[in-house]
Image (cartoon, rainbow, N blue to C red):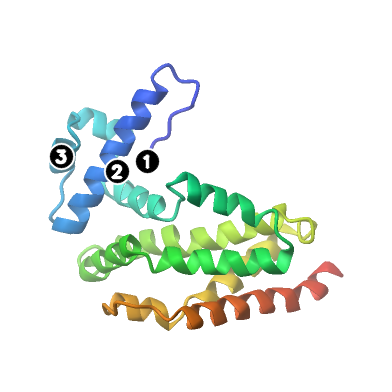
Amino acid sequence: MKQWNEDHPKAALMARKRADILNAARVQFLDAGYDGSSMESIAKAANVSIMTLYRHAQTKDKLFAAIIESACQPSTAEQKAELEGILSLPLPEALLQSALHMQDTLTSEETIALMRVVIGEVGRFPQLAELAYQGFFLRLEGVTATILSLLPETKQLAAPDRENLGQLFVNRIVGTQILRALLGFSELDANEKLKRAQLARDEIMNELPRLLKK
């Protein structure tokens, strides 16, 4: 989905329109599904012209991808401060808190609802699987690699090593709690989430000595 530079004369207006479009599209996709949503209905719900919508997102796929991306981004000042605070922590604690935060993101009500849309319609629209995989899981792998590039203990790692660690990290935190949430269990086990976070942290810490010697 198109982003506008902050120095654009109409940046504030464009940002508001983008937020309106994302909110309308999110409601449409969750209520009517991917197939049941159209660019025309989303434009109408967002109170923008169809041309304005296409300036922000050229296709319905790109709009759906933007919804997935927005679900993984901090949306409140408190959430943004939490993520910034992670970078000030010692490496083991930063990894632990990152794993907990990522699990919360993957099991949030919005994320689970979007995953259900994908599962329900992937047979007719196979591209949704790739959009969801990239938007949720690959993006979190990239976030992990970025965190490792900023922390003093790991910033000297080669980029491919950080990427591999990011993949390992996300693989460890995706567990049965995702399936439980998809199946509609009302409560997720906090102890299980903590154990997965600890295991993900410990595996990264165990890999680091070997990688730092390269």
Q: Position of residue 16 (x, y in %)?
A: 33, 31
Q: Indicate whether 133 appears above or below 45.
A: below
| N-term mark: 3 or 1 | 1
Classify 171 as above or below 166.
below
Residue beneath disc 2? 22
- Percent x, y of residue 65: 35, 52
Q: In the rendered view, does 41 fall on the left or right side of 87? A: left
Label 2 vs 3, first from the N-terminus: 2
Q: Residues within 10 Å of mark 2 (few under 14, many from 20)?
A: many
**Position of 28 relative to 105 (above/below):** above
> Is the C-beta separation of discs 1 and 2 under 8 Å?
yes
How far is disc 3 from disc 1 in space, using C-alphas? Answer: 18 Å
Distance, label 2 to label 3, CA atoms, is 10 Å
Residue 4 spot, x, y in % from top left: 43, 29
- Rendered residue at 49%/26% (across/down): 6
Return the residue at label 3.
Answer: 45
Mark 1 → mark 2, Cα distance in angstroms: 10 Å
Residue occupying the point 13% across, 36% down? 44
Q: Is residue 25 left or right of residue 93?
A: left
Q: Secondary structure at mark 3?
A: helix
Residue 57 at least partly seen: no
Residue 130 drawn at (x, y percent): 38, 62
Q: Residue at x 37, y 58 (%)?
A: 131
Tell me which corner region of the image, top left, top right, bottom left or bottom right, holds residue 188: bottom left
Mark 1 and mark 2 lie on one chain; the one further toward the N terminus is 1
Side (left or right) of 198 relative to 120? right
Type of amino acid at the residue the image marks with label 3: Ala
> Which residue is label 1 attached to?
1
